[in-house]
Amino acid sequence: MDYKKIDKKDIDFLISVCGKERVLVDDEINEDFSHDELAGIKRYPDVLVEVRSTEEVSKIMKYAYENNIPVTPRGQGTGLVGGAVALHGGIMINLSTMNRILELDEENLTVTVEPGVLLMEISKFVEEHDLFYPPDPGEKSATIGGNINTNAGGMRAVKYGVTRDYIRGLEVVLPNGEVIEVGGKVVKNSSGYSLKDLFVGSEGTLGIVTKAVLRLLPLPKKAISLLIPFPNLEMAIETVPRIIKSKAIPTAVEYMVRDVILASEEFLGKKFPDNSADAYLLLTFDGNSKEEIENAYEKVAHICLDAGALDVLISNTEERQESIWSARGAFLEAIKASTTEMDECDVVVPRNRVAEFVKFTNDLQKEFDIRIRSFGHAGDGNLHVYVLKDDLSEEEWKEKLSGVFKAMYDKAEELGGQVSGEHGIGFAKKPYLEKSLGNLRMQLLKNIKQSFDPKNILNPGKVC
Amino acid sequence: MDYKKIDKKDIDFLISVCGKERVLVDDEINEDFSHDELAGIKRYPDVLVEVRSTEEVSKIMKYAYENNIPVTPRGQGTGLVGGAVALHGGIMINLSTMNRILELDEENLTVTVEPGVLLMEISKFVEEHDLFYPPDPGEKSATIGGNINTNAGGMRAVKYGVTRDYIRGLEVVLPNGEVIEVGGKVVKNSSGYSLKDLFVGSEGTLGIVTKAVLRLLPLPKKAISLLIPFPNLEMAIETVPRIIKSKAIPTAVEYMVRDVILASEEFLGKKFPDNSADAYLLLTFDGNSKEEIENAYEKVAHICLDAGALDVLISNTEERQESIWSARGAFLEAIKASTTEMDECDVVVPRNRVAEFVKFTNDLQKEFDIRIRSFGHAGDGNLHVYVLKDDLSEEEWKEKLSGVFKAMYDKAEELGGQVSGEHGIGFAKKPYLEKSLGNLRMQLLKNIKQSFDPKNILNPGKVC
């Protein structure tokens, strides 16, 4: 790809749009903007621009399009697959400075936000109004823009679905700088191909989301968590399809193992309510009355005990739930802190295949003599499997990692799974996506990219 | 468009794929296949093929692609916008003969079906297993393939969302005859642009759906309907945003007026439980216990009475609910039977704008001196407005219809609405879609169509 190299004229243009203090070059660009949380690739943009409005984004894209300059949109940089790294340099647009909550519409149950609003700010804001934004990814300091672009899922997908299900409408700046709206405050829509659903999950490669209308629900009045210790992980996970089959509707079903819990205790300096068992299921139920929730979880508690659970620990106080879920939220960071380097596999498989997949990854530890840790969403089949470098040499690490990853993605495909459940493809998972989709489907993706971004200037080198 | 005209060689090829008895020409083609339920356009295909397998569809498409023959996929022909009419002749593929339920997977809560299975067959089948397919369009004898292609919504969208939300995976035959799978039995997916969501709602213009994996929920144990008479329609509809704002979660909120109820009584030869009031709201609540449902609807009943409702009639027996909902299901046919010809507008507006839109259409009756009837989904903002010809001359009808339609679509746009909530664009609503989306977005749609179907042979003349 033959892009124009950024020069003083370009910088002057950006300053004319955003002012000097929001256009950063050279040493002014913080090291954080050269990478994301994990993907193991590093590259600085030539210039970093902090935008404040759709108009600014539009002007910048128009200029970049006319001048053939690559543009990388970025939120909080919490991604794990290199989606927000400026692989080809050029302009990075920092959208985390477009972070206003624009409107709460209680008659239509929507909240309209700019892309830089953080997930935790959205929950806090809507819950103060007794409303609920269900998607609940572990990383609460991610921006909603990033969540939309990866179609993030989170813990509550079992009952409530994923980010896509809560996007009513978007404002998007196209690669050529034009601004369009897709969807709206409407509950139904059959008006041509769903551009909205194409932008959701497109990882900033088709357009830059500058506004989003999110669908809200009434806030459930009560929630309860069950922490259920099992003698081993397989017994724990094999119970999940029985729970689903029993027609209970848990909000979340997570699995975790003792090693990861211990790492999290150390990382947070806080005790987990129980760490005596090898493996745990963590379930949540929500609803509008104590009775409704009790009816739902009692059946599930019996299923777990019948399946060999050691106990059922009920957390019905806010403090206790907080201590469990804050530990759960710290798993990624805790595992990261326990090793020198790591890489992640975020496959999703049908939920009755999770046990088989987890057993397979355990066997890989022995086969490749490498440490592998996992936790994840047992209730929706989305696993987060971390391969750890520890004290391996760079060469050994590269070789083993590649072998383990190949084995895992092949296995996921064999089980009817997909390459990514919620973290996206970015740059790091492209080879696995290509293998999983094959030429035919990859060509359709490339055609779509080509028709939205014929000059390939928007987030080039990602997805396809 | 310069398509090849069907000749004997083509017919012979089709017979070689499907056998003589499933390849129909000339008088063998029933008149039904020349039109749909409403769109006012009539054209016979040159040949009608009843397919039984994906392989047959693939062979036919490959042949059509190589020979530049237009192909129109068709289900039960219950559409209202001409989506399944063979505008350019050529081959019509009748998918209603691919109608097997292939698999119920209770561990993953999915049912896998061929496209020709009827909506009523799916509900019956899954409910026998205590499971629930939530989308509930009025037309129960539509095929699931048609529902997927229009992203049909139905009554329960208020609580449960639309068809898109229940499609986990699809098998699709592309215009060149290649077969791909998109999505799968997975709950989450962030593996490249969502081709699945592009096919959903694409009205058979991007590919032919030959298999679908549908997401199911546990069947709610109880449901109750409230029929709530109001002195007039505006009072009824203005109550809906208050219900939504109260954080109640009804399953469905429909509105209806006395005229339409009387037409339905006459059409069905069955009495509606009450026809004394000018206007009604019909609400449903579902849940797993009597208490849960009672808690939910009591609050709503009070809101309605405070807002001037004349009464609240509770239907908690199956017979009573059946009598109400069968009347609701017959509204379209009843209105159709009451006039000589009609056309429909299926706009969707934000739910707090429904009252304004309905008032606007009432005023249009006087302004244009024409009969207009409407009913619809007050809870999700999707209206079905019928303009009736009665004894107008062909010329007057055309002129008035065009004026009324223009006024309605302009008004919907002004209110932040969309051209179609659930019936799609087909051929009949193309001018309104073009106006509503404008050049920029229409061009994106056309680019997508072009990249999937470069020869424009699959359902040409529809959507864009």
Image (cartoon, coloured by chain):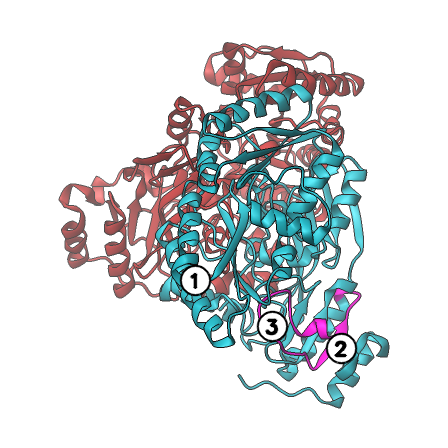
Chain colours: A cyan, B red
Residue type, numbered disc 3: Leu
Q: Dot 3, crowdedness within 10 Å: few (<14), some or many (≥20)?
A: many
Is B228 covered by the magenta stretch? Answer: no
Residue type, numbered disc 2: Ile
Q: What span is colored magenta in the figure?
A: A29-54
- Pinpoint residue A148: horizontal percent, then vertical percent: 63, 55
Residue B220 higher or lower than A20, as above or below:
above
Element under label 3? loop
In whole angstroms, how far apart are the C-alphas of marks 1 and 3? 40 Å
Q: Nearer the viewer, residue A336 or B246?
A: A336
- Badge 3 sits on which subunit? A
Mark toward the viewer: 2 or 1: 1
- Pinpoint residue A449: horizontal percent, then vertical percent: 51, 68
Task: Name the residue: 79% across, 48% down.
Answer: A103
Q: Quadrant of residue B12?
A: bottom left
In whole angstroms, how far apart are the C-alphas of marks 2 and 1? 40 Å
Q: Give the residue pinned by disc 3.
A: A458
Q: Give the residue pinned by disc 2.
A: A29
